[in-house]
Image (cartoon, rainbow, N blue to C red):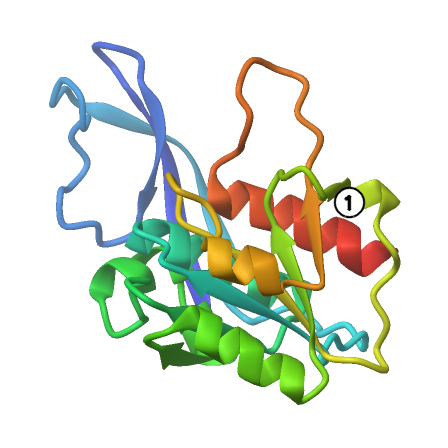
Amino acid sequence: MTDKFEIRTCRACRLRYPLPAYHPFGVRCPICMGETDVNLTQVISAEPPAQLETSYSYFTILLDNIRSAWNVGSILRTADGLGLPRAHLCGITPTPDQPEVRKTALGAEQSVAWSYHKDGLAFVLEQQKQGALVLALEQTSRSVAIQDASPVQEKRPVILVLGNEISGVDPGILEAADAHVHINMRGSKRSLNVAIAFGIAATLLLQR
């Protein structure tokens, strides 16, 4: 299966942009509606790349009260790219039942299994009883930089918790968590977008 794209340039405003074949808006410039010329046509294979053998079946994520459906979809897509098997969606976190999640997940909601739980803290406590190691991604008085965190081990299930974009990880979950980890920040902002932070944190943890 393949997809066909054209790279076009507007004769009037000189905008250069990609246009998928059979796009409903036609070949007019999307900014000034001027006429456009085709620079090149590109055919991209839609077949999935060969899968890596590395499996992180022991490593899952918990999204607790994430507000943005777009962030959730982006996190699911990154989780798929990293080979993570499951996401636990808690509280007000939108699920893939919502089209906004599916829009940014781009099909990852079908490859990353997910479950929904109303109470994130209750879920964390239950998972800890079953032996899970819970890591909260939050900068706190007890958090350590991910680069300095102890390596995660396949012998024990690991849950990485991501919290609300404004209020952060639930205080109850922070208290219950086995460890807190943070990403070192060097600019004026103290935090990153939660989807961006997840990609960085998970990649660093899995490489240790």
Q: Tell me where residue 142 sits by quadrant.
A: top right
Furthest residue in direction bottom, as rendered: 130
Q: In screen coordinates, is 142 left or right of 53?
A: left
Residue at image position (25%, 58%) is 100
Relative to 105, is 186 above or below?
A: above
Q: In screen coordinates, is 153 left or right of 112?
A: right
Q: Tell me where residue 152 sits by quadrant.
A: bottom right
Q: Tell me where residue 36 sits by quadrant.
A: top left
Local secondary structure at mark 1: helix
* Residue 1 in view (yes/no): no
* Residue 8 in view (yes/no): yes
Q: Nearer the viewer, residue 125 or 201?
A: 125
Residue at image position (33%, 51%) is 70
Q: In screen coordinates, is 172 left or right of 36?
A: right
Three-letter code, disc 1: Ile
The image shows residue 47 at horizontal and vertical percentages of 55, 71
Few, some or many residues within 10 Å of mark 1 (<14, 14–19, 20+): many
Q: Nearer the viewer, residue 146 or 29?
A: 146
The image shows residue 64 at horizontal and vertical percentages of 42, 61
Residue at image position (51%, 67%) is 62
Residue on which disc 1 sits:
146
Q: In screen coordinates, is 140 left or right of 153?
A: left
The image shows residue 207 at horizontal and vertical percentages of 84, 56
The image shows residue 140 at horizontal and vertical percentages of 63, 39
Please identify the quadrant where the C terminus is shown. Answer: bottom right
Residue at image position (77%, 55%) is 205
Q: Nearer the viewer, residue 203 or 157?
A: 157
Furthest residue in direction top, as rendered: 13
Relative to 14, is 194 above or below?
A: below
Q: Nearer the viewer, residue 44 or 142?
A: 142
